[in-house]
Image (cartoon, rainbow, N blue to C red):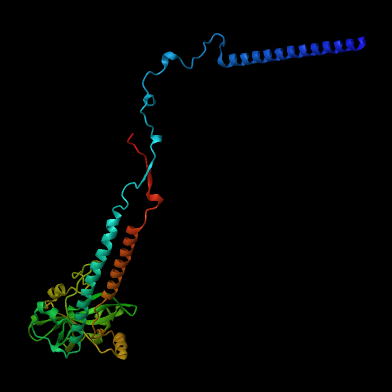
Amino acid sequence: MAASGSIFQCLLRTSQQSLGKRIILQRQTAAAHAAAATRFTTARLGRNPASSPRRQFTTSSTRRQTQQPGDDPNFTSILDNPPELVRTGRRHGKGLIILAIIPITALFLGTWQVYRLKWKTDLIAKCEDRIIRDPLPLPPRVDPAAIADFDYRRVYAEGVYRHDQEMLIGPRMRDGEQGYMVVTPLERGDDPSSKVLVNRGWVSKKFADQRSRPDSVKQGEKVRVEGMLREPWKKNMFTPDNRPDIGEFYFPDVKQMAELTGSQPVWIEQTIVPDIITVYDYEARGIPIGRVAEVNLRNNHAQYIFTWYGLAAATSIMFWLVVKKPANQITKRVRMNKSW
């Protein structure tokens, strides 16, 4: 029993000694870490940390003395007011006005084309009625103001071609071949002022020189010309101006040509019977090929009516869809209540 007690006391002393050594070792390690941290701080700051004063983060003397909104017991935060769901701005902009004007304008233009179609149909009917009538003899003097009432009227005149005053207008294409229109004054009787301008027809470019087509240039030969009385031509914006000083004509300026040749401002387009054999013979010999007696006025007003009315209907539907379209989440915004 005594031996057991001595053994227990021996073990107890050994454990205490081991525990004491462990505590001492931990204290030494902590001291070494503290010393290393002190040296690291001193090396970075370059001064002794013990000599530097401690930084004060807050003091009672620097506290702000102004009153805050939260100090008011009646204060209401913006978070206490619920947001209001509203539509921001106007639902439709100025584009809606333009969209409303388009169908109105298209409807007006379509209605205007209806009247234009009626006018063009009546004009073509009048011109076709004048073509089928027998040709009238052209009087010695023609009033230029009355030519509009006899447009496409078939007439005939007799006289002598003034080939020395011939003019070529062009270039003009026919069946893919380049050529010119031959305009020659027709001198009627002994009165020089009775001359009129005759558009004899088209010749190929290779026959532009009179010497290359002797069959069409016969000096002093009396001829009978049958054709259609036409109004003076109008120049478009893409056609260059004529150069009569060098003999270049790009469009038939009736008044200019009449003053140049001393003729009346009367334009006659010579006509031929549409015979393919005769046309081939004239083309091979360089004889001007006249035009067929027919009305060549364009009438596209029916297409314009369909286009304008279709545009009016389409834009009207678009306008209705835009106006009746329900508001979506994109057109809505959250507006905060700022009445606090």
Q: Viewer-proximal residue, 294 or 247?
A: 294
Q: Quadrant of the C terminus?
A: top left
Instruction: In the rendered view, tell whether residue 121 sits above or below residue 52.
Output: below
Q: Viewer-proximal residue, 42 or 132?
A: 42
**Is any atom of residue 239 visible in this view?**
no
Question: Residue at position x 29%, y 56% from top?
Answer: 96
Q: Viewer-proximal residue, 252 or 245?
A: 252
List x then y, in percent, for residue 173.
30, 77
Question: Residue at position x 25%, y 70% from top?
Answer: 110
Q: Is residue 213 left or right of residue 197?
A: right
**Is any atom of residue 118 visible in this view?**
yes
Rendering quarter of residue 277: bottom left
Q: Is residue 229 left or right of residue 42?
A: left
Count of picture labels: 0
Instruction: In the rendered view, tell whether residue 134 sits above or below residue 101.
Output: below
List x then y, in percent, for residue 22.
76, 14
Q: Viewer-proximal residue, 315 or 252?
A: 315
Q: Quadrant of the N terminus?
A: top right
Question: Residue at position x 40%, y 50% from top?
Answer: 330
Rendering quarter of residue 187: bottom left
Instruction: In the rendered view, tell whether residue 1 sits above or below residue 110.
Output: above
| Residue furthest front in the image | 1
Rendering quarter of residue 135: bottom left
Question: Residue at position x 38%, y 24% from top?
Answer: 71
List x then y, in percent, for residue 276.
31, 89
